[in-house]
Image (cartoon, rainbow, N blue to C red):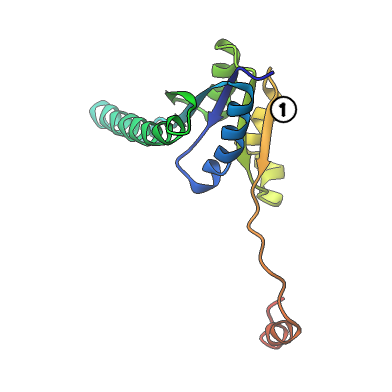
Amino acid sequence: MFKKILVPLDGSALAAKILPQVIDLAQTHQAHVTLIYVYYPPVGEATPGVIQEALAQERQSCEMFLADTARDLKAQGLSVDIACVEGQPAREIIGYAHQNGYDLIAMATHGKGEVAWVLGSTAEKVVTHATVPVLLYRVMEVKPPVSKEEFEELMLRGLP
């Protein structure tokens, strides 16, 4: 079913939480995996030399990070390659998937509360505009419920 899976990563632990699901999918379907990292060009006023140096450093960091991650996936028997792309993340992810014939985009996401409703998120933009199926893995940090005593203590201090 899935022969080519595109996995957007950004260097965060949250984004990497999709990897166990990708490993299972890729092994099940004998799919090729591409790890993609989209980095932003520098914002603000700077001399062209400074901008070019910043971009070169960002690309080098991207390549090192993705190479390490790819090595881990290859050790588990997967076929993996990497792509470091400069630009706006959602736009580049969608375009890369479409232009290179991917069957699936697999990425982690988390709720950002009301801010996400106004500004949107990369995952929301990808899922609403991609021309290929998108697998979103919702990552939530669940806090255990507080005990009655802890709740009363919080209420006494004025914290809900």
Q: Position of residue 105 (x, y in %)?
A: 62, 26
Single out the residue that lies furthest toward the right: 148
In which image quadrant can residue 5 be found? top right
What's the residue at 55%, 38% (across, down)? 19
Residue 147 falls left or right of residue 29 = right
Question: SS at mark 1?
Answer: helix
Q: For this rendering, which residue is in front, 135 or 47?
A: 135
Image position, residue 47 (x, y; %): 26, 30
* Side of 36 relative to 121 (left or right): left
Check the image and report above or below for 133 versus 40. above
Out of 68 and 46, give the one closest to the viewer.
Answer: 68
Locate residue 128 relative to residue 29 in the image: left or right.
right
Query: Which of the two residues, 10 or 135, is positioned nearer the viewer here?
Result: 135
Locate the C terminus by quadrant.
bottom right
Mark 1, residue position: 128
Left/right of residue 39 with respect to residue 148 in the rendered view: left
Q: What residue is shown at x 72% (from left), y 87% (from top)? A: 149
Residue drawn at x 63%, y 38% as measured from the top left: 121
Q: Residue at coordinates 76% horizontally, 84% vertically from top-left?
A: 148
Horizontal and vertical percent position of residue 130? 67, 22
Mark 1 surroundings: few (<14), some (14-19) or many (≥20) residues within 10 A: few
Give, as a three-letter code, the residue at label 1.
Thr
Q: Please state, as top left, top right, bottom left or bottom right, where the N terminus lies in the image.
A: top right
On the image, the x and y values in percent for residue 55 come to 32, 29
Of residue 29 and residue 156, the one placed in the foreground of this image is 29
Q: Quadrant of residue 57?
A: top left
* Rendered position, 152 above or below 88: below
